[in-house]
Image (cartoon, rainbow, N blue to C red):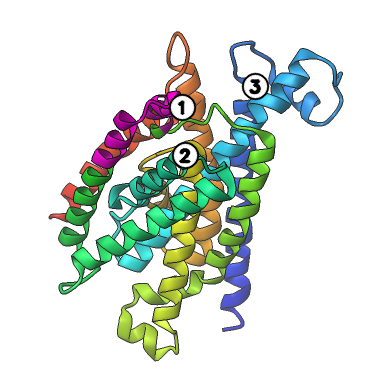
Amino acid sequence: MTAKTPSIISRIVWVSCLLLVVLLAAMILGSSIGSSGSQIISVLQVISGKSDPNSMLHTIIWRIRLPRVLLAALVGATLSLGGLVFQALLRNLLAEPYILGISGGSAIGAIAGILLGFTRFPGVSLTAFLGSIVTLVLILVMTSGQSVLKKESLLLSGVMVNAFCSSVIMFLVSLTQDARLHNIIFWLMGDLSTADIHQVGLLAAMLLPCFMIIFRHSHAMNLLLMGKEMAQSTGLNIKVVTITLLVTSSFMVSATVSYCGLIGFVGLVMPHLLRLIFGPDHRVLVPACILGGGAYLVICDVMARTLPEQGEMPAGVVTALIGAPLFILLLKRSER
């Protein structure tokens, strides 16, 4: 036991350091790309405080690009980690907040909060959280009586809930005359362009405690994958751990949805990729998903800004183009 503990700690440290370098590189790249253009060296000088604070580049970096990059990193980390948690709890590698409809439920709650005139925090964030919880309970009720962990019933329930959520969202959008809600279709596809440094700080304050809670339960997720009876024999309180992780993950996802809309398949792509590279130990995968997921969405957002000749596309379009074919591939492989 004493030999294994230093070993796992060293693995966590070197994996985290490696992916932190990747994340920082992606963030610097994201901060240096824009319509006005700039060199990476210039960006580093601005961030380190060695440039003129009154310059145009200083304003662009600190007020537009850096908040957007930070938001992308936070959202990517959250969605990747959320996917990892759902896959562990449901023992289904195809589980992911977007596929299961959790994100759709959060979007309905967020739109309801906007219609009621709530502020983004705590009003819209709270209604988005309630929407995600209601959706999660609905999925669990639909799959109960068989097994919550059964792949076919779980995915079918997620597809049905997703379709229902999409219908409700379009109904709410078409019902109102509010100009803000008619622009919500772009937001629902994953819009990171409205990032504000103060809002990003507030979102980070909500998400970082959730990251720590999930990391604290990372060993419990390893035990859950071994099966219910085996986990209980180790003294694990399965009910408490499951509820804690489900509520924490739903809160994280709903918080990100209330800020930037629906961004799908991040929680499918990154846990699979990182599991292939670093193995199945959740004590390593949790920090890997936080850092790797953040880097992945920053890169996807850079692609969303640079691929169109004019303007930009929502980041959710890029993640869907990558994630949807992977989902089909994994589904085909799981049927063999």
The x and y percentages for residue 300 are 46, 31
The x and y percentages for residue 306 are 49, 17
Q: Nearer the viewer, mark 3 or mark 1?
A: 1
In percent of the image, x 42 and y 24: which residue is there?
183
Tell me the amino acid under the disc marked 3.
Answer: Ser
Q: Is residue 293 visible?
A: no
Q: Secondary structure at mark 2?
A: helix
On the image, numbered disc 2 is attached to which residue?
114
Q: Write the start and end of the magenta stretch as one range.
A: 166-187
Disc on the earlier residue, 3 or 1 = 3
Tell me the amino acid under the disc marked 1.
Answer: Arg
On the image, numbered disc 3 is attached to which residue?
32
On the image, numbered disc 1 is attached to which residue?
180
Q: CA distance from mark 2 to mark 1?
A: 9 Å
Observer-nearest residue: 166 or 124?
Answer: 124
Q: CA distance from mark 3 to mark 2?
A: 33 Å
Q: Secondary structure at mark 3?
A: helix
